[in-house]
Image (cartoon, helix red, strand yellow):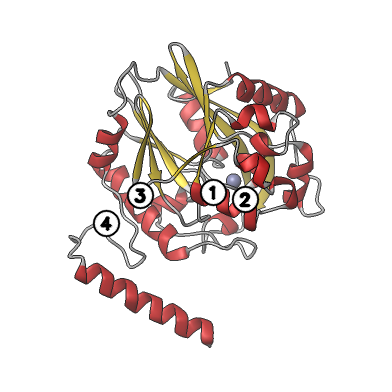
Amino acid sequence: MKRRFLAIAMLLLCATAARTTGVSAGTQSASGWTASIEDVRRTAALIPGRRPLRINFLKFAESRRTKNFSVKDASATPSIQARTAFQVMYPDGYVMVDAGMDLAVHRFFGRGVEEPYFPEAARQLERAVRGATLIVVTHEHGDHVAGVIHTPVAAELASKTILTRTQVQTLMSMPQMPEIRLTDELARRFVVVDYDKYFPLAPGIALIKAGGHTPGSQMVYIALESGREYVLIGDATWHMDGVRLMKGKDASWITEDRGAVLAQLTWLNGLSRTAPNLLIVASHDEEQHTELVQKGVLANRLE
Ligand SMILES: [Zn+2]
């Protein structure tokens, strides 16, 4: 009852805030989250230099669940959640988006059930992370961030890994699992940034603040030299049906800001119609990755 009252109070508060700030209609939602693709594009163009040439990804583990967990009201048909990381290739180096995880952290996700883990892919990913010029993570969950924390080379990687202030706070005070808890000492080694809406990361790349799935979630917008555009949305949804149908997850173990996530799915849905050539890529949607590889717009390998 108390929680329900709080939720209603929050809703009223947000509605009032939206009215008093006079934000124009459109993507503005009750959660207050919104974004402008034009502003994102401008932010991505701020840092001079050649833009990226291509994007690679690799799957290093899987969760085998049914689709109804990923998309509320979907059927309980089998659905593979691919655990992946992305590599954004420049002419003279690359940026890793997400950093994978070791076997110990992988086992946490199985919750007692042994799920597929691909050691050779995990080793390739470890090498790619060590060779990266810069590393950034979509959010502070183990399958995305453990590769720069729960590893013997964490101190080395931290100096070239950008975490947001919110991600650091979550990792220090309420990490998803004990293995990724950040100590004071290690936290100080990371490059920590705090930004309001968008952040220019590298030529052609902008971060979009998108707290919801976790407090420190962000999306990564990438414009290639060819003009092709991508938004890596992390875990805003686990399956692209979440964007198509504008429906959130239905997973009891996930604590999300559902209002914010729904606002993000709604924005992405709009984007898929107004910018049909921009590719919205979910971290875990195996079906989508296969389709993008077939179309030649995503390469299933690391360099
Ligand atoms: Zn994930």
Q: Residue at x 69, y 26 (%)?
A: 121
The CA span between labels 1 and 4 is: 25 Å
Say whether disc 4 or disc 2 marks the residue closer to the N-terminus.
Answer: 4
Residue highlighted by disc 2: 171
Say whether disc 2 or disc 3 marks the residue closer to the N-terminus.
Answer: 2
Query: Is residue 112 shown left or right of residue 14?
Result: right
The CA span between labels 1 and 2 is: 6 Å
The CA span between labels 3 and 4 is: 17 Å
- In terms of depth relative to the viewer, which is nearer, 140 or 234? 140
Residue 279 visible? The answer is yes
Give x and y (percent) for residue 252: 63, 65
Residue highlighted by disc 4: 27
Residue highlighted by disc 3: 196
Residue highlighted by disc 1: 167
- In terms of depth relative to the viewer, which is nearer, 271 or 176? 176
Q: Quadrant of residue 122?
A: top right
Q: Residue at x 60, y 35 (%)?
A: 189
The CA span between labels 3 and 1 is: 14 Å
Q: Residue at x 67, y 20 (%)?
A: 127
Give x and y (percent) for residue 221: 38, 35
Q: Secondary structure at mark 3?
A: loop
Neighbourhood count class around disc 1 (C-alpha, 10 Å): few under 14, some 14–19, many 20 upward: many
Amino acid of disc 2: Leu
Contact? badges 1 and 2 (CB < 8 Å) = yes
Contact? badges 1 and 4 (CB < 8 Å) = no
Neighbourhood count class around disc 3 (C-alpha, 10 Å): few under 14, some 14–19, many 20 upward: few
